[in-house]
Image: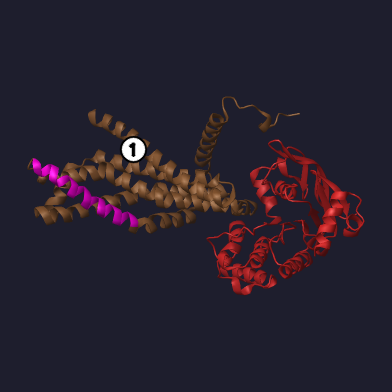
Amino acid sequence: MEEKVVEIRGLMKSFGDLDVLTGVDLDLYKRENLVVLGKSGSGKSVLIKIMVGLLKQDSGTMNVLGKEVSTLKTKELNALRLRIGFSFQNSALYDSMTVRENMEFPLVRNIKNLTKKEITAKIEGLLDSVGLPQTINQMPSELSGGQKKRIGVARTLILEPEIMLYDEPTAGLDPITCGEINTLINQVRQEYNTSSIVITHDLTCAKETGDRMAVLLDGQFGSIGTFEEVFPHAEDKRIKSFYDYNFINS
Amino acid sequence: MTEKAADRKPLLSKKIDKFFTGLADAWNFLKRFFKEVFVPPYEFREVIHQCYRIGVESLPLIALTGFIVGIVFTNQSRPSLSNFGATSWLPSLIAIAVVRAMGPLVTALIAAGKVGSSIGAEIGSMKVTEQIDAMEVSATNPFKFLVVTRVLATTFMIPVLVMFTDFVALMGSFLSVNANENVSMLTFFVQVFESISFLDIISSVLKALLFGFTIGIVGCYKGYNSSKGTEGVGRAANAAVVMAMFLIFIEELLVLQIVNAIRMM
């Protein structure tokens, strides 16, 4: 049996009178790419934000790399966060910094005793691997949406995380760039041995990147399995309509 | 089952509840600042960077405004003093007015507009584009990096800017006095320094520290709590200026009462 890196049990989260997660159970295995699907506002992003301690669950457990996130003190939580890479929906690159400074930021603040040469080599290596070495001195405002996404991923990889969380990696991108991002997600797993959770509502992205799919319906996972198990012959109308919409329209 | 926030009936009315919730939030924000400011790691480099941005980049605007204030106030005061044949009191009058009130007030109001709005908009935009979350997940305390550094920078730099404004305003006043009353620079500044006391300078600096702190903390608070996308960023920037200006006037009034009470002792 593969080693579990994330174990979620009975996770509940509400915002005011809106119940977003109503008892989520989920496992993520080592070197697995798990895709979490669901319509907008279904709580997909909330789930991964709880995973890195940006939000706190109301009840249930969230065990990441052997640690229960909600019980960690700030120092322990920060140590855990360094083992998780979070690629944000809008890339979240720091506007006031160049690409180099964006990538330097997590590195110089968390790993001491690195020489300037080592830092530059690391940054250039990662920019090479995401195919954007020429952007090193550019500001985020000068980059396209796809480039921002790639730099965002490169920035998270600089700390060599064990788990990667991708929040809507292909949202707002053209089909060609979507394909490039999907390739990048697979390439990251290959090169860095990461386990990943990909949050998306794009079934093409799900099919290309995911080993398993988990569909979030009404605050719980309605169906978990491989793409073939979950989608083509889905009995649940909501999952079926999800599949039909994505594939009939593409 | 726990009672949900939205199901709870407001204690008085929604608006009053919102007001007190806002007050409690602001108080918690202030408490968090004082808690974080003394706890390592200290972000010295970022404080210096912010001091540069806030201080040096505000200098031209502050200088121009101070210079104009000095000339205008001198020219406006001259006819009234001249009715009593007291134009020789102009340097003293200007010195007292500039050092005690106008220097700190004008600088703080200009800085609230320029620096406060920029802090509110910058942090607000970082909030709505998840840059603050990105900072947090890379194990950096965004409150310390963004809020503490900016508040310290405004608190340190506004007094420096006030001194600069005082000097430039007095220079503007001197030019006007020199052109009309043919008073030398030495005579002008001897009168200036004879008319201001140590208490005037200390109260001016303390007031500037308070104004600087207010501009920084209000800008950061409004930015840090902004929501609703780009509209929220605009609102945060606007609210940062309006709230900071309002508080500056209240603080001016309170400090004036305290200083007057000390003067009478």
Q: Residue furthest bottom?
A: A134
Pick whichever, B211 or A76, lies toward us.
B211
In the image, A175 versus A20, the foreground residue is A175
Q: Quadrant of residue B89?
A: top left
The kind of secondary structure element at disc 1 is helix
Quadrant of the drawing holding the N terminus of chain B: top right
Using residue A13 as the reference point, say whether residue B240 is left or right of it.
left
Q: Amino acid at mark 1?
A: Glu
What colouring does the structure picture have? by chain
Residue depicted at x 24% and y 52%:
B169
Does A140 lie within the magenta span? no
Most frequent secondary structure within the magenta stretch: helix
Q: Work out whether A162 lies above or below A57.
A: below
Determine the residue located farthest toward the front in the rendered image. Answer: A249
Mark yes or no: residue B32 visible. yes
For the question of whether residue B184 can be seen, the reply is no
Q: Which residue is mark 1?
A: B252
Chain with brown colouring: B
Chain letter, red: A
Read off the magenta span. B61-83
